Image (spheres, rainbow, N blue to C red):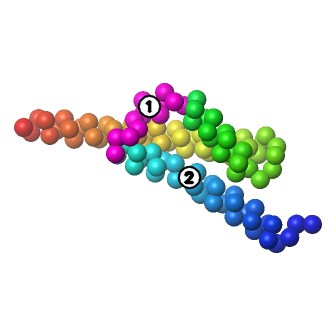
Amino acid sequence: MITVNEYFDLTLMILLGLGLVFELPVLVFFLSVFGIVTPRFLWKNIRYAILIISIVAAIITPSPDAMTMLIFMAPMIGLYFVGIGVSFMVVRNKERRLAAAAEAR
């Protein structure tokens, strides 16, 4: 029999884990603004990102079966691709501003 404390601990772990994961595009945005990552870097290292995503999904997943882990991995990989798109837009806007500033001189 599952106790109320065990249920709330499980729910809290899942919600906090997924809440942190859904901040991935925001993190990529700030890293792109400061010039730490570029869309090319993110695309080039996608293999490592998927490895890290699978490890995080395995930690967050409440049960040991692979299907649940894949269900947790799918939005994370999608958010990684959204992060690549966000990074592309940030870099493109930076380049446009630099080109406009160079033309104004």
Question: Is 102 left or right of 36, judged from the image as shown?
Answer: left
Tell me which amino acid carries mark 2.
Phe
Q: Which mark is residue 41?
A: 1
Which residue is located at x 42 percent, y 43 percent? 86
Tell me which amino acid carries mark 1.
Phe
- Secondary structure under tag 1 reads helix
The vertical placement of 48 against 61, above or below, is above
Which residue is located at x 60 percent, y 44 percent? 76
Which residue is located at x 48 percent, y 42 percent? 83
Q: Which mark is residue 22?
A: 2
Check residue 45 for magenta coloring.
Answer: yes
- Secondary structure under tag 2 reads loop
Indicate the quadrant where residue 49 lies.
Answer: top right
Check residue 36 for magenta coloring.
Answer: yes
Q: Residues within 10 Å of mark 2 (few under 14, many from 20)?
A: some
- Can you give x and y, in whole percent of width and height, for residue 23 in the image? 52, 53
Q: Residues within 10 Å of mark 1 (few under 14, many from 20)?
A: few
The vertical placement of 88 against 23, above or below, is above
Q: Nearer the viewer, mark 1 or mark 2?
A: 1
Q: Is residue 74 visible?
A: no
Could you tell me if the residues under marks 1 and 2 are in contact, i.e. CB atoms within 8 Å?
A: no
**What residue occupies the far left of the structure in this picture?**
105
- Can you give x and y, in whole percent of width and height, for residue 51 in the image? 63, 35
Q: Which residues are magenta?
A: 34-46
